[in-house]
Image: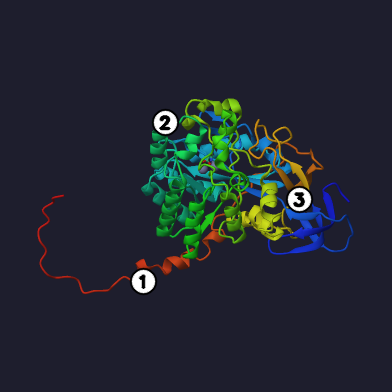
Amino acid sequence: MSQSSILIRGGTVVNEDASSRSDVLIENGLISAVGVDLKAPEGAEIIDGGIDTHTHCQLPFMGTVAVDDFDIGTQAAVAGGTTMLLDFVIPAKGESLVSAYHKWRAWADPKVNCDYSFHVAVTYWNEEVAKEMETLTKEHGVNSFKSFMAYKGVYQLNDGELFNVFQKCKELGALAQVHAENGDAVSEGSAKLLRLGVHGPEGHMLSRPEEVEAEATQRAVMIANRVNTPIYIVHVMSKAAAEVIVQNRREGKRVYGEPIAAGLGTDGSHCFHCNWRHAAAYVMGPPLRPDPTVKEHLMRLLATNDLQCVGTDNCTFNADQKALGKDDFTKIPNGVNGIEDRMAIVWEKGVVPGILTPNEFVRATSSSAAKIFNLYPRKGRIAPGSDADVVVWNGDASRVISAKTHHHAVDFNIFEGMKVHGIAEVTISRGRVVFRDGVLHTMKGSGRYIDRPCFGPPFDGIEARDKDRDERKLKVEREPYTGPVVKDLGVL
Ligand code: URP
Ligand code: ZN
Ligand code: ZN
Ligand code: ZN
């Protein structure tokens, strides 16, 4: 067999809809056949490589730069069975979106060890931004734009601006994403906590309780629904915000929700830890919640498909970087790890207790993302013609997560000491073995930027919904009023 051919024999191929005992033949970076002829070792499950919908490799943020760069971040990814990252370009206010995109590409392209693509954040609004969004969709394969409802004075957009962004997204067929937290409430809450003398990491969590996230989630969904465009809520961290998504989906609104590995695997009780470094390591926005039942709740919503994709929001900072906020929690760089452990966390907390089936696991960690971001079936499925991003997954094997052994650059792991089942025994990216039996075989720069065309599955039926809107249907045809009209005095 030639160098670029790999035959995986005798495993169970687990797609989102069904599993079957099959062999998988990989040639020239693609899956060329899935069949049943050959015998091989027992126990292995062959799953599609994971897609992490939400990462921030080497993000310049809150006065410093995230330590997992595109090299280390993608090494951690493949070590955990993830073969594609959707990272974020976040332009500074006033910065050209297109030049920020090119800057991020120059950071990522020489370093990535697996495929990736970019969402782009819209951090301010004007007509030039609208034109640049169009350029990004038409020339740079971007089909998703994130707006922030928090980070007041930095990235936060007001409701009018959200309307403009969502309207433009709809016109382009791009998915509107939001960071849903009421930034004014966060700002007021933080100031109040500091006034009360709470300066430690717990202040971050206490200053923005669940209702702050839920209110923004509802507002984002309302605005998207007014515009009639699909909306994707990134990093859903609370029961209250998840409930908003569930209710709106019940009403037929086109809403998607993304929990993250941190929210499914741990909780915000760590922010009360007496060791400052430990507590600060869990600071992220929206915060991990102190309620220890949130993780299982969110996992159950993945099972019912009320929430769809599992991301990580991987945005890692070492102790000395977190220490920028040692006297003031508002200055602690927000972010946690997750890229490497995401698949194992979902397996351990989802599949092991029987909340998710292995097929639902594949849906939540890969296929849904591929569909929502219009990569399917090139990504997200094991079938002839699909990219050979494949993982030989051993659901029975276990390991203990630790910063001592992880593949991240960061000096802390929020899942430290957790025993998890589900190990990537072999990870194949673009038809090459990049991780095997605990050893990386990555090649820096071997990953590719993947273009994502607009008008993906979230837009199916949107035009028909437009035609069906009450605004059009309920227009009343009348004879014009012909009676007297008072003079407009021009008073307020
Ligand atoms: O704490 C977080 N989430 N850091 C990354 C930036 C963001 O809002 O996603
Ligand atoms: Zn360009
Ligand atoms: Zn965010
Ligand atoms: Zn993020």
**For the residues marked 1 and 2, what is the alpha-carbon distance in whole angstroms?**
52 Å
Number of the front mark, 3 or 1:
3
Q: Nearer the viewer, mark 2 or mark 3?
A: 2
Closer mark to the observer between disc 1 and disc 2 = 2
Disc 3 crowd rating (10 Å Cα; few below 14, some 14-19, many 20+) is: many
Residue 111 visible to an observer of this rendering: no
Name the residue rendered at 88%, 63% in the picture: 37
Which residue shows up at 42% across the image and 41% down it?
156
The residue that appears at 68% across and 43% down in the rendered structure is 341
Answer few, some or many: residues within 10 Å of disc 1's Cα (few below 14, many 20 plus, some between 14 and 19): few
Q: Earlier in the sequence, mark 1 or mark 2?
A: 2
Q: Amino acid at mark 3?
A: Val
Task: Say few, some or many: other residues with alpha carbon within 10 Å of mark 2 (under 14 / 14 to 19 / 20 or more).
Answer: some
User: Measured from the top left, where is residue 94 in percent x and y?
Assistant: 43, 36
Which of the numbered marks, if any, corresponds to residue 391? 3
* Among numbered discs 3 and 1, the one appearing first in the sequence: 3
In this rendered view, identify the residue nearer to me: 278 or 93: 278
Q: Quadrant of ligand 4?
A: top right
Q: Outermost residue, front direction?
A: 274
Left or right: where 482 falls relative to 444:
left
Give the amino acid at mark 2: Leu
Which kind of residue does numbered mark 1 sit on? Lys
Query: In the structure shown, which secondary structural element does the residue marked by tag 2 occupy?
Result: helix
Q: Which residue is mark 2?
A: 194
Mark linked to residue 69: none
